[in-house]
Amino acid sequence: MGIGEQPPSDSDTTDSEKEQKSFYERFHRDIQNPRFAIEVVALVFLVLYTIFSGYQSCKMRQATKATITSSETAKKEFEMSERPWIAVVPSNRERNYRQPEQYECDANFR
């Protein structure tokens, strides 16, 4: 300490305490402003909208996967039901068991 300077008293606050007190005073003043209330409501709406959009995206992915699985199953079933069928029918001459060359082939395409 120099000559003529007084030692700091306990009542003096530090700079950080002043800044914190200043912040709380501004915050208290801003809360009373209608614009602050609108900004808080907009922030809450934004958070809720983001959550809802994420949920929609998740459900859309699940639906897409289910659709792909369903379409693949339908494609396989269609291929199985629409393939050509060949039936071997014995000739009308003899229906007894004979040599294979005595049978006629009847191609039955649907």
Image: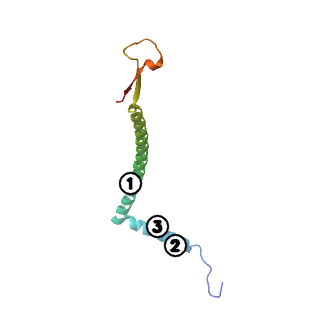
> Which numbered dot is residue 24?
3
Q: Quadrant of residue 79?
A: top left
Query: Residue at the spot x=65%, y=88% of the render?
Result: 3
Give the amino acid at mark 2: Lys
Query: Which amino acid is tagged 1?
Result: Tyr
Q: Quadrant of the C terminus?
A: top left
Residue position for label 2: 18
Residue 27 versus residue 88 in the image, above or below: below
Mark toward the start of the polypeptide (3 vs 2): 2
| Mark 1 nearby-residue class (10 Å; few <14, some 14–19, many ≥20) | few
Callout 3 environment at 10 Å: few (<14), some (14 to 19), or many (20+)? few
> Marks 1 and 2: CB-CB under 8 Å?
no
Q: Where 109 falls versus 71 (above or below)?
A: above
> CA gap, disc 1 to disc 3?
30 Å
Please tell me which residue is depicted at 47% across the width and 71% down the height of the picture: 22
Mark 1 or mark 2: name the one nearer the start of the chain: 2
According to the picture, the residue beneath numbered tag 1 turns out to be 49
- Quadrant occupied by the N terminus: bottom right
Q: Secondary structure at mark 2?
A: helix
Residue 83, position as x, y percentages in the image: 40, 32
x and y percentages locating residue 42 in the rendered image = 36, 60
Residue 32 at x, y percent in the picture: 36, 65
Residues 27 and 89: in front is: 89
Residue positioned most to the top: 96
Element type at marker 1?
Answer: helix
